[in-house]
Amino acid sequence: MDSSNVSCSFFIKKVNDFANRYGLVVKEAFNHRDYMFQFTEFTGRNPVKLIVQLTKQEPLVEVAEHDLNRRMKKCNISLPTDEQYIKQWHLHT
């Protein structure tokens, strides 16, 4: 058996075991060491607290960052008719 296939399957198993342990889904694999994971309903933890736990206690994790951005939906709304609205940048950013 080719050693590259063995090492590849070894990393795949490690990553899958890690994801299953924390209720994560692999969103993207950048290489054999760098991955992007997504939380699921099975994660069962606060995302920020899990990132802290992974960073401090998980030997497989060198760096972990959270992205708390939410997908936004466009809505049809009427803009205020107040002439000063445009000067209130914090209301329309």
Image (cartoon, helix red, strand yellow):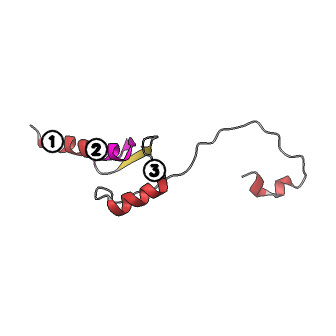
Q: Is residue 25 magenta?
A: yes
- Looking at the rendered image, the disc whose residue lies closer to the viewer, 2 or 3, is 3
- Which label is found at residue 17? 2
| Three-letter code for the amino acid on which mark 3 is drawn | Arg
Looking at the image, which residue is at 77% across and 53% down? 91
Disc 1 + disc 3, Cβ < 8 Å: no
Separation of residues labelled 1 and 3 (CA atoms): 33 Å
Q: Mark 1 points at which residue?
A: 6
Q: Position of residue 42 (x, y in %)?
A: 42, 41
> At 39% from the left edge and 43% from the top edge, which residue is drawn?
23
Q: Kindly identify the residue that appears in the image at 72 percent across and 37 percent down.
A: 75
Left or right: 14 with respect to 54?
A: left
For mark 3, give the secondary structure: loop
Earlier along the polypeptide chain: callout 2 or callout 1?
A: 1
- Of the pair 28 and 66, the residue shown nearer to us: 66
Magenta stretch bounds: 18-32
Q: Which mark is residue 29?
A: none
Spatial CA span between label 2 and label 3: 18 Å
Gap between marks 2 and 1 measured at Cα: 16 Å
The amino acid marked with disc number 2 is Asp
Quadrant in which the N terminus is drawn: top left
Question: Which secondary structure, mark 1?
Answer: helix
**Can you identify the residue that label 3 sits on?**
45
Side (left or right) of 65 relative to 31: right
